[in-house]
Amino acid sequence: MTRTARPLRLLMCRPEHFAVSYEINPWMDPARPVDVARALAQWDGLRATLEGLGHAVELVPGGPGLPDMVYTANGGLVTPEGTVGARFAHPQRAGEQELLDAWLTGAGFGPVHRPVEVNEGEGDVLPVGEHLLAGHGFRTTRAAHGELARVLGRPVTSLRLVDPRFYHLDTALTVLDDDPDHPDVAYFPGAFDEPSRAVLRELFPGALVTDEATAGVLGMNAIGDGRHVVLSPRATGYARALRERGYEPVPVDLSELLRGGGGPKCCVLVLRG
């Protein structure tokens, strides 16, 4: 099958304030010092790679005391039907909400719906063709899925995450192609309970199913544009499987940002509409 890339408009935040000063997921260890210069260089490499693939990157400024704002995917969900902001599960990230909402409003993506329920944006909600796949179990609550459906007027498919290493949906599932005519995903079954695995099998019978070796290096946290897949260089088996499927893997090293629990997808919020 011939794969066709689609240009993306992406929101990113340079990790000038990046640190691992607290622990809110299993990847974080505050006892290990962070190399901020290395994190910045790796992030700059990701941005350059995305722009080199033809994608437009816009920047939201971070702020002191907000070390996780580099993971902009968690800051909202932007769709043609409307924009839903974030309501973070942990108080350490709450300060990101105002900055992200203000940027989205100023860029013409408002009004931003401020959720009542805990909702960590595109970290847990991934549009795939006509579907809105939504994770719950660690961060975004199941109740938030109903709120999303009401606000956006779209059905939401709930998927329960059961492994704390994969605390957001985008750490366990990659949207490879969200074209409604041929949506395509890859996922790690071990991150989900059996009813959720059954839903994924029904919705995407031809999906690429990955393994522990891929998921264990956060390989599923990847950016797909219909042809290219920007992913961790450590996910070598995943890269081989993608090539066999007709995709072009594009490895980018974000090992320093992985220490905060994020990979390439965590670092971008897709601006749709």
Image (spheres, grey):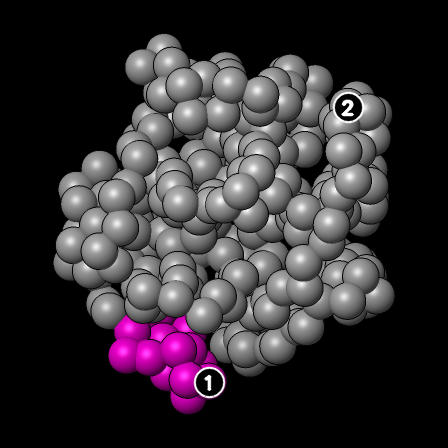
Residue 147 x %, y %: 17, 52
Q: Which quadrant of the structure image shows residue 150?
A: bottom left
**What is the crowding at mark 1: few (fewer than 14 residues within 10 Å), some, or many (at least 20)?**
few
Question: What x and y, as percent, mark residue 156?
Answer: 28, 41
Mark 2 neighbour class, 10 Å CA radius: few under 14, some 14 to 19, many 20 or more: some
**Going from the N terminus, do you reach mark 1 or mark 2 first?**
1
In the rendered view, tell whether residue 228 sits above or below residue 245. Answer: below
- Segment colored magenta: 97-112
Residue at the image point whose x is 62% and y is 34% from the top: 220
Residue at the image point whose x is 71% and y is 67% from the top: 55
Q: Residue 99: say if magenta.
A: yes
Q: Amino acid at mark 2?
A: Ala
Question: Is 156 left, or right, of 1 in this rendering?
Answer: left
The relative height of residue 101 versus residue 228 in the rendered view (above or below) is below
Q: Amino acid at mark 1?
A: Ala
Image quarter (top left, top right, bottom left or bottom right) of the C terminus: bottom left
Q: Is residue 162 visible?
A: no
Q: Check residue 19 in the rendering and tell me which mark sits there, or answer none.
A: none
Which residue is at the front of the view, 172 or 196?
Answer: 196
Nearer to me, 88 or 117: 117
Assign a secondary structure to mark 1.
Answer: helix
Instruction: Tell whether position 82 is magenta.
Output: no
The answer to whether any part of residue 57 appears in the image is yes
Q: Quadrant of residue 171?
A: top right
Numbered tag placed on residue 241 in the rendering: 2
